[in-house]
Amino acid sequence: MSSNLTSCSTDRLALFLEGQLSPPDESSVIEHLDTCSQCQSWLETRAGDEDWWRDAHDALSGIGVPELGSEGEETQDIAVASAAAMADALRLLGPSEDPGMLGRLGPYEITGIIGRGGTGIVFKAWERRLSRYVAVKVLAPHFVHSAAARQRFSREAKAAAAVVHEHLVPIYAVDDYQGLPYMVMRYIPGESLQRRLNDQGPLEVCEVIRIALQTARGLAAAHAQGLIHRDIKPANLLLERGVERVLVTDFGLARAADDASLTCSGVIAGTPQYMAPEQARGETLDARADLFSLGSMMYAMCAGHPPFRAETSLGVLHRICETRPRPLRQVQAEIPQWLAEFIDRLMAKEPENRFATAEEVADFLEEELAHLQNPLAVPEPERSWSRIHTETRRWSRNIIALAIACVAVLAIGIGTMMTLPLASPPTAPEEAAQVQAAGGGAETINDHGAAEVRAVQGMVRAVEQRWSQPTAETPDAWKEEARALRHALDRVEAQAGLADF
């Protein structure tokens, strides 16, 4: 969305259709159309005259359902679409020899429309030579003569083809038909995440984690190639039927992380409800922008709606940059605290406060999913990423370190006293010195961890062994000190979980 397209401009769209915009303005209109369904509809209804629409409607009214393929897979699959949208799509196709088909695009027989966006249409097609269904994406008719749109389409094809991963939709071919570029992708039987949310509302926790985990794996593969998706949202996640596999699609906004055009002044690309604050401000992006979008999408899976909502796109952008979403557990009380905190961290306003990489996110989610699916065999994850966990553990370690230091001082004091002739207990100044030494030793023990704990344990056990057979001359006070020393160490071990050190 361009800064000079703060509201929908039909005059600008009309100039765009007539090819009278400058290249920068043309690019900004294309970016705006990605996020504005109102402008998409306006453009579609003016892409042909009234006679053409009437003829298209009459032609469409006689189209039957094609009987395709011998695999028994979806033989009735003309997607539900308005007559206007179908007619708009048919303008791109050549005639087919099969009267049951909608048309032909190169060697591909078109059976229906899978979906359409601001700049493109995705067909379902039958590839006869390989006897398989494929998805074919082409530019919308009103972009055929736009150099900027063609460049963007080419960028998407190259970006998607550059990364091969089980959670990214694979590209089979890139070609053109009568000057119209198209790409051929694997057809994914199933539905988009957006469709599932529309039909079912909020998802179960295990399903949320599974979908987010697989999405993060796909993003990690793209990021490893230096690509930022920039438009992660439920509509761009395909849920493959029968195998519970998630595939990321639509790399139309993907660009290399070091692409200078990412900082293009005044241009905002992406879907407002899920974009990162730095993306909404038109700033330089890195892979962590995709992580914010992933967090927003996880919020939507838990809540049933996006985290940021407003009457207009500008209102949404303002909320993303300036406000926090409603706490997730206030929306869905059954969401685990750790999951709400995990999503909060993904959606941190500043990139440095999010997780570092998609791979890290996927690893954490994999641990959580394994525990949820088999809690008896897989222990609950430590969640070292948790802010609450980190602060609590830091506090606990400081307290425990001080306690261990005090125990160490007592052990050393008693060990020293055992080597001396029997005498009266230490004076008050000496006790004060011991307490001061304990405080000074806390930092050392906290820093060095396991070795110091083992040393203290060894000293205490040595004292216990030395006093296991006390004599009649042993002062009762010293016997009490030895017992107190053992009890103190027991408490420290129980509170610290010393196996962690």
Image (cartoon, rainbow, N blue to C red):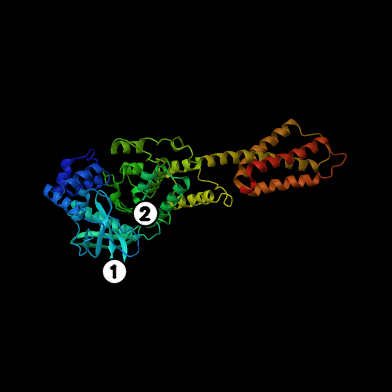
Can residue 481 be spotted in the picture? yes
217 w.r.t. 106: above or below: above
Image disc number at residue 361? none
- Asked where in the image residue 305 lies, by quadrant, the reply is top left
| Pointer 2 with pointer 1, Cβ within 8 A | no
Going 70% across and 46% down the picture, which residue do you hit?
457
What residue would you read off at disc 1?
A: 129
Place of residue 362 in the rendered image (x, y in percent of width and height, measured from the top left): 46, 52
> Total marks drawn?
2
Image disc number at residue 190? 2
Q: What residue type is labelled 2?
A: Gly
> Crowding at label 1, few (<14), some or many (≥20) Cα neighbours within 10 Å?
few
Which residue, as the protein is rendered here, is positioned at the far top?
Answer: 428
Q: Which of 165 and 347 is in front in this view?
A: 165
> Crowding at label 2, few (<14), some or many (≥20) Cα neighbours within 10 Å?
some
Going 41% across and 35% down the picture, which residue do you hit?
326
Can residue 148 be spotted in the picture? no
Place of residue 98 in the rendered image (x, y in percent of width and height, measured from the top left): 22, 64
Q: Nearer the viewer, residue 247 or 317?
A: 247
Q: In this view, does 24 lie to the left or right of 235?
A: left
Q: Nearer the viewer, residue 354 or 425?
A: 354
Place of residue 371 in the rendered image (x, y in percent of width and height, measured from the top left): 54, 50
Q: What residue type is labelled 1?
A: Arg
- Label 1 element class: helix
Q: Nearer the viewer, residue 256 or 47?
A: 47
340 w.r.t. 166: above or below: above
